[in-house]
Image (tube, rainbow, N blue to C red):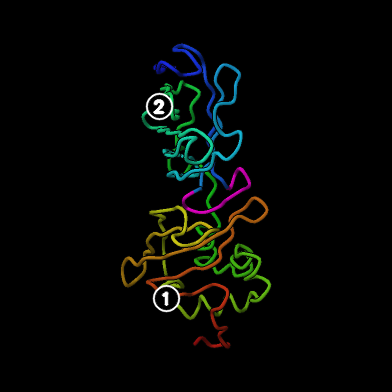
Amino acid sequence: ITEASQHAPVKVGETCTITVETAEAAGQYFSSSRNCHAKLQCAGVERYGVTGGFFPCVVVEGVPLHGADTMTSSADGDPALWFDLRARKARLRDDAFMIEIALGSKAVSPPPPGARDSEAYEKIFSDVRARHWASGHAKMASPYRAAYTIDDFRRAVEANSLLLQHTAAAVAITGACDGLDIGRCASGGLTTPSGKVKFDVAYVIEEGASRVMTLSVAGVPVLGVGIAKLPDGGS
């Protein structure tokens, strides 16, 4: 603790432990406004996250980077919390006190690109390029797999020349899906013979792994529940 106001329940120099994880990792994903969960313990006493503890945050490569619960106890029953992994700082604030915390060397840093396992939506593009239809189908979410066969998957891909002929895929943005209470979204670019085109994916976590719910290319839905099945031969 680097700073503590007059009525703070802790003192400068005392040690705190803060744990921040995605709400998915905590097993309780709610929405884009509650996509992270934190616990804060100072001098052996739980100061935040005993109840509640969910708030919006920015997640990069699966690591919560910065975020804030802006409401104090008078508003929602627990203190306000702010953290920024880049600045190596955290702040706990309530109606009558505030404390500043310097995050030490044990604070986790966002991993460099390529340091994590690829998500299912990234692997699907590899499967499409290799024409591994069964493997791609397996990376779709369970509602899709229950309603669409491997051949349905293949026909849908083959009917979209941009997806079928792309040579590379690069993810640009990941995060909570706007307007949805569950699921995550990702967007990026596909390299195609016609140039770069945008893709959009919505995905969920099933049994600890990401699975694709919908995939669109250049704004056109290609894969997902509710998309009409195609007969052999394309559209």
Measuring 59% from the left and 60% from the top, which residue is drawn there? 211
Measuring 42% from the left and 44% from the top, which residue is drawn there? 58
Q: Is 80 inside the magenta-drawn segment? A: no
Q: Is residue 157 left or right of residue 148?
A: left
Q: Nearer the viewer, mark 1 or mark 2?
A: 2
Quadrant containing the N terminus is top left
Q: Regarding mark 1 in the picture, which secondary structure is present there?
A: strand
Q: What segment is highlighted magenta in the picture?
A: 24-33
Instruction: Give the residue number, with chain letter if any, for mark 1.
Output: 220
Vertically, is 79 above or below 212?
Answer: above
Q: Regarding mark 2 in the picture, which secondary structure is present there?
A: loop
The percent coordinates of residue 225 (x first, y second) are: 58, 74
Measuring 52% from the left and 20% from the top, which residue is drawn there? 16
Q: Amino acid at mark 2?
A: Arg
Q: Is residue 137 left or right of residue 200?
A: right
Q: Amino acid at mark 1?
A: Val
Mark 1 vs mark 2, CA separation in Å: 42 Å
Instruction: Give the residue number, with chain letter if any, for mark 2.
Output: 88
User: Which of the two labelled residues, at mark 1 and mark 2, occupies the earlier sequence position?
Assistant: 2
